[in-house]
């Protein structure tokens, strides 16, 4: 009997070693190396190929056919629908709603769906489906199995229009002598699933677990192999869930889908601006409204700031949903360029609704909230802001300003503050556009 060859794989990054080490030299994690049996085929490799070299000019551009799903938010993120033969990986925190999202999709679509689960029994899935109270799909088939070979066999026999596998970390191939969830198993199972999807032109959705750092568990090569990588995140203390594309071979990665978790499942938020803006009965200092952009989708977010005298000596800087380093930079600009003494004060910043965004157009609204709280003067609830702050105190232009102005006008705002460097169309808006160039001018115009 030939001696089995074993290698050590890092369970965090997938790096390969010939002997065990306490620390992975690639990612720096400790005690993540696991021994796995590696079997290599001794068959001779054929050099014959069915394909041939072709000039790119001679290639005909064929638009990929798509399956339009009942979820408009999912269609937006995917770039118009699910491409036939594509493999999509969706990751997220436990309990965030990954399985709920895909089960709702399976129940709503008027297609033959195969829902494979290695984590739940058929009765548990049925209980969740009844709770969702969705339209029942008579062609939705359940298969609770972890063996890759059995799943591929049943899928080939059923030939569905769409396959959902929950999750890739629970699958196990008989060709690999290691436990489910290891690097070798995930790599082998993913290879076979992608091969099945491409050969039969059947789209496949894979659910992936994530590590404590928020990365999809398993080797990084898994994200390179699939066509689309979706991230489903959100704060469990808030109702909103955000669906983003980290990778998309068939569309943009800048779009975002917003859902609300309710008792009957996930509800699509068609107009997030109306949900995220709090309707106040009285004007309070420290509140402002920012006009942000996610992909081609304008949204209005409420920014809240609290500035108070530091009690414990060292001033605190805390932000939720906003980059704390950028907050420190904006405070330094306020102190240097506008003369506000904020070095001895605590500053707390919050974006309501649990939304996290990195749009630089939030800078102007953040400055407005901080100044409003510091001076204890309320900003009119009919004002909104869109502008980036430079280190010299200038108001820099933002992208797609016309869409931002139109969104603010649609929601009934009376004035929007933007940079005077933005190139505005000659048409007249139903909202007053206040153009400013310096942070000093902004302070005078606001108060």
Image (cartoon, grey):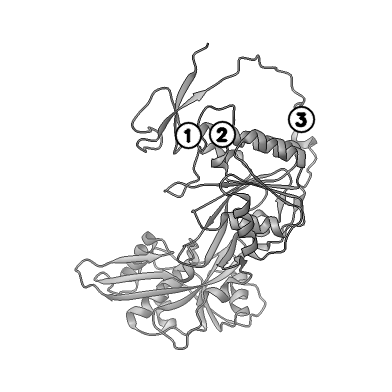
Identified at 30% across, 74% down, the residue is 339
- Whether residue 194 is visible, yes or no, is no
Front-most of residues 292 and 151: 151
| Mark 2 closeness class: few <14, some 14–19, many ≥20 residues within 10 Å | some
Check disc 3 and report its element: helix, strand or loop: loop
Residue 126 is marked as none
Is residue 13 shown left or right of residue 244?
left
**Dot 2: what SS?**
helix
Q: How far across and how far down the image is residue 76, in percent?
A: 66, 59
Q: CA distance from mark 1 to mark 2?
A: 10 Å
Q: Nearer the viewer, mark 2 or mark 3?
A: 2
Please report contact status of discs 1 and 2: CB closer than 8 Å, yes or no.
yes
Give the image location of residue 130, x and y in percent: 65, 62
Q: Toward the viewer: 52 or 263?
A: 263
SS assignment at label 1: loop
- Dot 1 corresponds to which residue? 14
Q: Of callouts 1 and 2, which one flags the residue occurring earlier in the amino acid sequence?
A: 1
* Residue topped by disc 3: 54
Q: Is residue 137 left or right of residue 333?
A: right
| Picture quadrant where residue 41 is located | top right
The residue lying at 76 percent from left, 47 percent from top is: 161
Residues at marks 3 and 1 touching, judged by CB atoms closer than 8 Å: no
User: x and y percent of residue 319 in the render?
Assistant: 38, 65
Rounded to the nearest whole Å, what is the CA distance between mark 2 and mark 3?
31 Å
Q: Is residue 285 above or below residue 46?
A: below
User: Which residue does the numbered mark 2 point to in the structure image?
Assistant: 187
Q: CA distance from mark 3 to mark 1?
A: 35 Å
């Amino acid at each position: 009997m030939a001696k089995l060859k074993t290698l050590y794989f890092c369970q965090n990054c997938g790096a390969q070693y010939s002997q065990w080490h306490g620390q992975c030299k690639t990612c720096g994690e400790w005690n993540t190396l696991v021994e796995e049996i590696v079997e290599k085929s001794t068959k001779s490799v054929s050099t014959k190929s069915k394909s041939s070299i072709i000039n790119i000019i001679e290639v005909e551009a064929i638009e990929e056919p798509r399956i339009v799903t009942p979820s408009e938010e999912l269609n937006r993120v995917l770039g118009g629908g699910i491409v036939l033969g594509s493999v999509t990986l969706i990751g997220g925190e436990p309990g965030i709603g990954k399985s709920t999202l895909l089960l709702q999709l399976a129940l709503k679509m008027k297609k033959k769906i195969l829902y494979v689960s290695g984590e739940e029994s058929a009765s548990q899935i049925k209980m969740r489906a009844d709770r969702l109270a969705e339209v029942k799909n008579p062609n939705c088939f359940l298969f609770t199995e972890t063996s890759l070979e059995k799943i591929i066999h049943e899928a080939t026999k059923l030939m569905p229009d769409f396959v959902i596998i929950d999750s890739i970390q629970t699958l196990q191939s008989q060709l690999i002598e290691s436990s489910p969830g290891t690097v070798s198993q995930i790599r082998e199972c993913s290879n076979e699933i992608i091969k099945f999807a491409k050969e039969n032109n059947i789209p496949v959705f894979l659910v992936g677990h994530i590590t404590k750092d928020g990365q999809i568990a398993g080797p990084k090569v898994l994200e390179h192999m699939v066509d689309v990588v979706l991230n489903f995140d959100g704060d469990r203390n808030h109702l909103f869930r955000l669906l983003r594309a980290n990778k998309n071979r068939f569309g943009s990665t800048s779009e975002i889908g917003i859902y609300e978790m309710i008792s009957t499942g996930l509800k699509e938020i068609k107009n997030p601006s109306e949900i995220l803006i709090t309707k106040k009965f009285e004007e309070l200092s420290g509140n402002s409204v920012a006009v942000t952009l996610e992909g081609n989708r304008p949204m209005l977010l409420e920014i809240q700031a609290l500035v108070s005298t530091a009690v414990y000596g060292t001033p605190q800087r805390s932000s939720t949903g906003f980059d704390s380093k950028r907050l420190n930079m904006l405070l330094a600009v306020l102190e240097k360029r506008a003369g506000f003494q904020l070095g001895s004060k605590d500053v707390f910043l919050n974006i309501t609704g649990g939304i996290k965004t990195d749009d630089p157009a939030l800078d102007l609204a953040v400055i407005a909230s901080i100044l409003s709280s510091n001076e204890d003067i309320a900003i009119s609830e009919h004002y909104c802001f869109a502008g980036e702050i430079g280190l010299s105190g200038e108001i820099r232009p933002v992208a797609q300003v016309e869409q931002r102005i139109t969104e603010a006008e649609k929601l009934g705002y009376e004035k929007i503050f933007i940079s005077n460097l933005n190139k505005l169309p000659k048409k007249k808006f139903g909202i007053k556009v206040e153009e400013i160039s310096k942070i000093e001018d902004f302070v005078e115009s606001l108060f």
